[in-house]
Image (tube, rainbow, N blue to C red):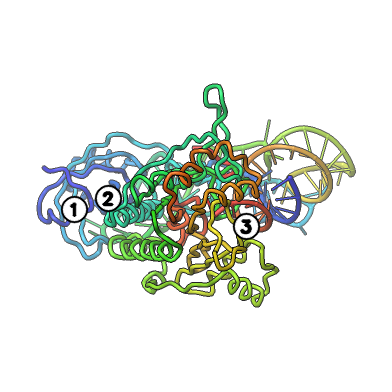
Amino acid sequence: MPAVYVENVGDHEGSEITLRGWVYNKRSSGKLQFILLRDGTGSIQCVAFKGNFSPEQFDVLDKATQESSIEIRGEVRKDSRSPGGYEVDVTGFEIFQLAENYPITPKEHGTAFLMENRHLWLRSSRQHAILKIRHEIIKACRDYFDDQGFTLIDTPIFTPNACEGTTTLFETQYFDQMAYLTQSGQLYNEATAAAFGKVYCFGPTFRAEKSKTRRHLMEFWMVEPEVAYANLEDTMQLAEGLICLIVDRVLTKRKQQLEVLERNIAALEKISRPFPRLSYDEAVKRLQAAGSEIKWGGDFGGGDETLLSEQHSSPLLVHRYPSEVKAFYMQPDPDRPEVALCVDLLAPEGYGEIIGGGQRVDDYDLLVKRLEDHKLSAEPFQWYLDLRKYGTFPHAGFGMGIERVVAWICGLSHLREAIAFPRTLYRIYP
RNA sequence: UCCUCAGUAGCUCAAUGGUAGAGCAUUCGGCUGUUAACCGAAGGGUUGUAGGUUCGAGUCCUACCUGAGGAGCCA
């Protein structure tokens, strides 16, 4: 009898198979038992008739509790009453372990309890659907860049200095010196872009900001492309293409999971290029008209981003922010030096920023001055300044936060469900 | 760091300052098509912690702890 995964059960109609997994739920009616078995690829209802077993055997099966690990042998049968279209008539079984008092019941639970049991919560259908979609999004990112000739070059997690100087970093002992957990691979990407032309890195990043909101995690994943000889416009198009591929992939390959999440699929189907573009100047005017207190020169608050992204059914590209609110390496606009050649991509439906990027300063003297303006010591940036000394080149890139994309695509109300084991302000367990 | 709200059975929640309750889960019994199955029964409590007010506190007051939502900060 072949061992089969639930997702392939349809290929074995009429034949005997072996399934291995866990009891997701069970109902019984005296002479019949309905066992909903899940194995990571899906779940299927297995039906046991009392007449096919000795009374003792039937009783053993009846004692199988929620999340007990079990092997079930049986015949695959088409059945319109079953959600997946197929059922298995049980002919034999073996219980590996009876799970006692599984804490997550089919009823409602609070956030704190579910987070405390995150290692078990992952087994539930909703979390399973989210992480399947996350996987699809990550695969789409890799395919997108790989297919365009990018080289994946991962950047270090331990960094010797507080790179951008804009955010609080996690500090850790590195033998006899201090090190910091990376907040971005971007500076290193600029070095590899000079070696490989088109590069990207994909890894975890860390921020020690005491942010306690639905859109912040202490540890999150970013994909960051960097392209030699690209400008702001190239970067906006690269970002647009990436978002379109992600949306298209998820709609094509993960519709079932979107349905489990009861996601409004029509909202995703509407997304197409080109995305509307809005200068920072226009965005400020629009926000003021909508009642925001924002003044020209200030960065958007969380409420401002939500406001802007709620006004569009498409993602929105906001470009040319004031240089002052952006990182030191952002290239000033030659026509208007007070603004930077940078862009943020805001997801629709109020999800806000998912991409930030732009063109980098490529002039040595200007970069030195920008470091001074930001009160950063030039000493740790010598290698970075070298890039402007030995064949400097215009270049641009961006960073995209994976969890924020997952939250938007899945329609989640909080980032903590977009990653298997979220690190939030006051929780590092499990 | 600040603001708001909440901590009662394993879980989700009730209980006017006056006997601690329900649903789910668990255990036992019933049911041949269940879909968060259903029906019957049982066990299950130092009401977050420490003080205080009161004849009497789950309920009111103070401090602390824990969690949730938000602000700031940030992506």
Question: Is A41 located above or below residue A175 in the figure?
Answer: below
Do discs 1 and 3 belong to a common subunit? Answer: yes
Residue ID for mark 3: A325
Circle number at residue A21: none
Whether the residues at callouts 1 and 3 have beta carbons within 8 Å, the answer is no
Instruction: Kindly give the residue lying farthest to the bottom in the view shown.
Output: A289
Quarter of the figure with the N terminus of chain A: top left
Tell me the mark number nearer the camera, choosing from 3 and 2.
3
Residue ID for mark 1: A8
Q: CA distance from mark 1 to mark 2?
A: 9 Å
> Who is closer to the viewer here, A90 or B19?
A90
> Who is closer to the viewer here, A414 or B57?
A414
Question: Is A237 located above or below residue A381 in the figure?
Answer: below
Residue ID for mark 2: A41
Amino acid beneath label 3: Val
Q: Residues within 10 Å of mark 2 (few under 14, many from 20)?
A: few
